[in-house]
Image: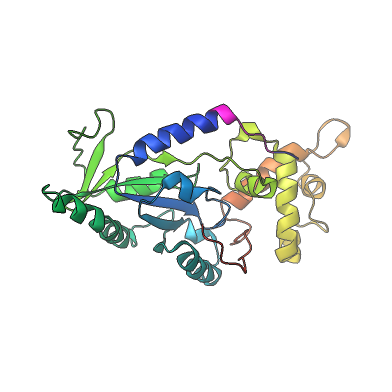
């Protein structure tokens, strides 16, 4: 199995992201809680530069909360960034997100005021890999404020901004971090959670890799869930009478089914990255 990447698309995405980064004071980076490391760009610090960064571990409702606490502690220590846990649904953490973004922007605002400029709201943008929940974060942040303030003088004529409150403005389009990975294990994990385009892989080998990984965590439970003796695509297909010509198991249909089960949380709550022992900064 090999996940195929498209260098031209990656280069274009990087250029577009860097153009947006020049407009803002603070970065809100969204990661998938199921992949606290793998859903981040391997060279994130170089890509984002020295701008303050707030990490959001999104889709926390799909993972074990006690296990996630250890990841929050690890990421705070290794990135030196604030880390906030958020869910795909619900708004209870939004006030904390807004408050922290404003706090991280304050040094930049103070520097501008020291040059004689008037205080202005902080400017933020949401970034992350595909399908980590960037748009849902933006939608939740902007839901209570429909005040679009349009193009900003001296900034850009093309980007649109939304006033979240008097202290914070948000770029209303997310910055997409391209899924450029040399590590195929990381790549296949991203495929598990739909952070890789379906055009880049076949579902069967990805679903087999997922079952192999999950079987090491809770094989008996998953065998019971699918009512099979062995956790394989073939057995799951035959159990559901999903067969094709010559009564062969329809493993492609089954692969799509298994991946959907995992992505929607029906198989259980898992974090698929292993908590590192080292403290390499990300």
Residue 193 placement (x, y as % from top left): 58, 47
Specify start and end residues of the magenta stretch as a single range: 3-8
> Residue 155 lies in what quarter of the image?
top left
Q: Is residue 257 above or below residue 218?
A: above
Residue visible at 53% across and 47% down? 41
Q: Give the left or right position of residue 96, taking residue 215 as reference.
A: left
Q: Main secondary structure of the magenta part?
A: loop
Q: Is residue 240 left or right of residue 19?
A: right
Residue at the extreme right of the image, as rendered: 246
Question: What residue appears at the point 47 percent right and 35 percent down from the top-left corner?
Answer: 14
* Image spot of residue 122 (x, y percent): 23, 50
Q: Residue at x 53, y 71 (%)?
A: 70
In the image, is residue 256 part of the stretch drawn in magenta?
no
Q: Which residue occupies the foreground of this view, 167 or 130?
A: 167
Picture quadrant of residue 180: top right
Residue 80 visible in the snapshot: yes
Q: Quadrant location of the N terminus?
A: top right
Residue 218 in the figure: left or right of residue 117:
right
């Amino acid at each position: 199995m090999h996940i195929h990447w498209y260098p031209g698309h990656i280069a274009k995405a990087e250029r577009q992201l860097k153009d947006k980064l020049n407009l803002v004071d603070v970065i809100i980076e969204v990661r998938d809680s199921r992949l606290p490391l793998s859903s981040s760009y391997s060279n994130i610090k170089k890509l984002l530069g020295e701008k303050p960064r707030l990490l959001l571990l999104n889709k926390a409702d799909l993972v074990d909360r006690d296990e996630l606490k250890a990841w929050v502690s690890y990421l705070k220590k290794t990135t030196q960034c604030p880390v906030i846990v958020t869910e795909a649904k619900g708004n209870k953490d939004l006030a904390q997100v807004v408050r922290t973004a404003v706090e991280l922007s304050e040094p930049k605002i103070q520097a501008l005021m020291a040059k004689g400029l008037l205080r202005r709201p902080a400017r933020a943008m949401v970034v992350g890999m595909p399908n980590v929940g960037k748009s849902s974060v933006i939608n939740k942040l902007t839901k209570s404020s429909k005040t679009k303030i349009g193009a900003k003088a001296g900034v850009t004529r093309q980007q649109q901004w939304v006033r979240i409150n008097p202290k914070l403005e948000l770029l209303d389009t997310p910055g997409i971090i391209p899924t450029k990975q040399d590590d195929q294990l990381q790549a296949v994990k991203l495929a598990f959670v739909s952070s890789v385009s379906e055009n880049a892989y076949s579902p069967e080998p990805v679903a087999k890799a997922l079952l192999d990984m999950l079987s090491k965590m809770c094989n008996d439970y998953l065998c019971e869930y699918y009512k099979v003796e062995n956790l394989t695509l073939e057995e799951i297909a035959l159990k559901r009478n999903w067969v094709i010509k010559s009564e062969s198991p329809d493993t492609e249909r089954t692969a799509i089914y298994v991946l959907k089960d995992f992505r929607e949380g029906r198989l259980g709550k898992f974090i698929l990255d292993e908590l590192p022992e080292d403290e390499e900064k990300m």
